[in-house]
Amino acid sequence: MSSTNIERVLTALREMHEAGILKDYAIGGAFAAILHSEPISTIDLDIFFFFKEKQTGPVLSLKKLYDFAKTKGFTFDHEFINIDGWLVQFVESSENPLWSAAIENADGLTIGHLEAKVIDREHLVAMWLLAGRPKDYQKIGMFVDADILDYEKLNNILNRHGLLVKWEAEKWRFSNEK
Amino acid sequence: MSRAYLRSLPLDEKIARLVDLQERYYELLAIRASNGGRPIPSKWQKWREAKRTGGLSERDKDVGTPYRSI
């Protein structure tokens, strides 16, 4: 296996789960796109997650994550935790029904010797469609080009989250759209 | 190299290629900046700093260099 330290990130996530910080989590964003399709350039690794304990304050606090990072000697700022050179961004997802469903339905992939939960292709496409930035549409186009989408599953997700109209309006952007 | 081939790579090899892409992209940004072009974007500076401080090289691992923390 090539040495990328990614197993250190996966181990840290498992430890956060075992420590009762994360209830559930999954890899999303461009990193998930790479795992499902092909390498593209990205600087960070997005983790969509739920805290085990519901937050009660008006402002989301990531203190528990930062405290964990401190105990492990990971550096961090307001945006990223640096795990062995990987910039890991944590996205609390309990308030977003689409993100929540994406975590709950994530695929289990084996990376090296470790299991990783990775948001499935169709939920990723729905999340990118919702975000609607040019780089999001590029990733949708990449999946469409690769012909790796289950369109029945995608339609169900888009319908459930009120995104079918947007899909119809935007699908001209993606080559080989179906 | 075809995109179909890239898609067929094992996951750990895809990740290794991502790391290679990141390093080559940063190198291009640094060359552009050093030749009077736009400065390296802050997110890429942050990426570089993360690699420098958080990523242990194989040599560092051999001598047990500790992580740096704030």
Image (tube, coloured by chain):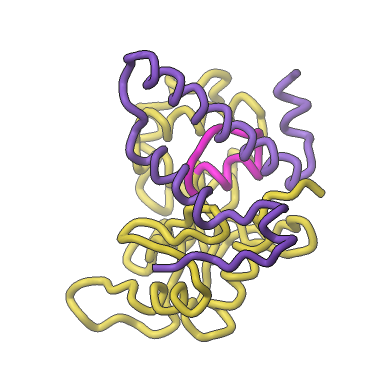
- Residue for point 75% across, 25% down: B4
Direction from residue B18 to residue B42 in the image, left or right: left
Count of marks placed on residues? 0
Q: State yes or no: residue A41 in magenta.
A: yes
Dividing the picture into quadrants, the one containing residue B30 is top left
Q: Position of residue A152 (x, y in %)?
A: 59, 42
Residue A84 versus residue A54: which sits nearer the camera?
A84
Visual hue assigned to chain A: yellow
Residue A9 falls in which quadrant of the image? bottom right
Q: Is residue A11 magenta?
A: no
Q: Residue at x 75, y 41 (%)?
A: B13
Residues A165 and A8: in front is A8
Is A154 or A36 nearer to us in this picture? A36
Question: Looking at the picture, how far across and down is residue B40, in whole percent?
Answer: 36, 30
Residue for point 78% across, 56% down: A112
Quadrant in which the C terminus of chain A is drawn: top right
Instruction: Using the image, determine if residue A71 lies above or below residue B60.
Output: below
Can residue A12 be spotted in the picture?
Answer: yes
Identity of the residue drawn at 62% across and 40% down: B19
Q: Is residue A143 visible?
A: no
* Residue sitting nearer the eye, B52 or A90: B52
The extreme front residue here reads: B63
What x and y, as percent, mark residue B61? 70, 60
Q: Quadrant of residue B22?
A: top right
**Chain B appears what colour?**
purple
Is residue A69 toward the left or the right of residue A59 in the image? right
Seen as rendered, the residue at the extreme right is A1
**With respect to residue A113, does A35 lie above or below?**
above
Residue A33, percent from left and from top: 58, 41
Taking A129 as reference, is B26 above or below it?
A: above
Q: Is residue A155 above or below residue A39?
A: below
Q: Which residues are magenta?
A: A30-44
